């Protein structure tokens, strides 16, 4: 099969969105999980959003002039993040996904590290990514719901400002050995980022309480305080990805009323430091 891999153009939005919807619907329903996209239109909206982001790239797979797959890459920071990757169900198990991944890895071979989130029930994707050199670093539980408790008044939680970026970068580097400055800057501009301020020192922050966001802290109490503050003040349900090896934080989430929706894995190649403190990850890493 002569699989052609090329950069995206705007005319790819509809075929890539349709394939994204069909591919995820097929595998999720086969394993009895709710698909991430409720319609082709929703999947197309997601593709359109990232196609317009200058710090994201997309590769498209073609077979005999027909679009059969695509792969998005977040290029905002030194760690590259892959996903979602999708292949038309009619052309799966024919090397399309492998070729897409090979070209992505070639293009980003100089990156400090490359990471992705893998649906743990999808044995085919786990086998593919492992064969390409990725390693499972964290088992993850996708969790969703409302928190029961009120926030502790003694911990100062506030919305982050651009001038907090340096302190947050230092905290992220201390705990995880990397910076996510450009990603966090986007979240601050969107108004979704909050932190714990202890006498002018940032000890915890979250970029958002959705699957697109991540959070980290020097200790569990500070991260829990941010979650409780946002949910209480803004009456927000949350949907986050919690590493299950963090038994204390994982059990706290369960006791607060969150429920496990799906199992995932954080997979990585290149630089990876064993995380310190307390954290949850995004659908990126």
Image: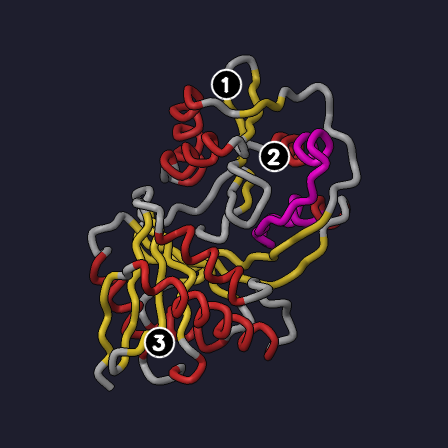
Most foreground residue, 68 or 281: 68
Quadrant of residue 78 within the rendered picture: top left
Which residue lies under the disc numbered 3?
68
Q: What is the secondary structure assignment of the residue under circle 2?
A: helix
Position of 89 compared to 57: left or right? right
236 part of magenta stretch: yes
Q: Position of residue 271 (x, y in %)?
A: 32, 49
Task: Using the numbered discs, state the Cα–Cα distance from disc 2 to disc 3 in whole angstroms.
Answer: 42 Å
What residue appears at the point 42 percent right and 36 percent down from the top-left corner?
A: 186
Task: Using the numbered discs, state the Cα–Cα distance from disc 1 to disc 2 in whole angstroms.
Answer: 15 Å
- Between disc 1 and disc 3, whose residue precedes? 3
Q: Position of residue 236 (x, y in %)?
A: 69, 39
Position of 105 compared to 147: left or right? left
The vertical placement of 239 against 158, above or below, is below
- Between disc 2 and disc 3, whose residue precedes? 3
Which residue lies under the disc numbered 1?
201
- Between disc 1 and disc 2, whose residue precedes? 1
258 part of magenta stretch: no
Specify the segment rendered in magenta.
Answer: 228-251
* Quadrant containing the N terminus in the rendered view: bottom left
What residue appears at the point 51 percent right and 25 percent down from the top-left corner?
A: 160
Which residue lies under the disc numbered 2?
223
């Amino acid at each position: 099969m002569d699989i052609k891999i090329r950069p995206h153009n705007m005319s790819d939005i509809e075929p890539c969105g349709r394939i994204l919807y069909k591919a995820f619907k097929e595998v999720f329903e086969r394993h009895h999980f709710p698909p991430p996209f409720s319609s082709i239109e929703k999947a197309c909206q997601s593709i359109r959003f990232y196609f317009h982001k200058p710090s994201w790239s997309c590769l498209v797979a073609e077979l005999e002039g027909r679009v059969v797959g695509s792969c998005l890459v977040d290029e905002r920071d030194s760690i590259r993040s892959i996903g979602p990757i999708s292949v038309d169900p009619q052309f799966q198990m024919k090397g399309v996904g492998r070729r897409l991944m090979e070209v992505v890895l070639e293009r980003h071979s100089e990156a400090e590290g490359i990471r992705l989130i893998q649906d743990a029930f999808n044995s085919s994707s786990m086998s593919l990514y492992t064969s390409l050199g990725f390693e499972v670093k964290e088992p993850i539980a996708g969790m969703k719901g409302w928190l029961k408790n009120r926030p502790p008044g003694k911990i100062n939680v506030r919305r982050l400002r651009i001038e907090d970026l340096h302190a947050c970068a230092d905290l992220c580097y201390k705990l995880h050995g990397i910076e996510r400055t450009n990603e966090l800057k986007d979240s601050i501009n969107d108004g979704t980022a909050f932190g714990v301020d202890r006498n002018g020192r940032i000890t915890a922050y979250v970029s958002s309480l959705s699957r697109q966001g991540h959070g980290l802290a020097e200790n569990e109490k500070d991260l829990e305080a941010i979650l409780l503050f946002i949910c209480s003040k803004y009456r927000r349900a949350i949907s986050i990805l919690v590493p299950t090896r963090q038994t204390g934080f994982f059990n706290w989430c369960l006791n607060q009323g969150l429920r496990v929706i799906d199992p995932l894995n954080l997979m990585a190649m290149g630089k990876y430091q064993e995380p310190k403190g307390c954290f949850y990850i995004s659908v990126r890493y």
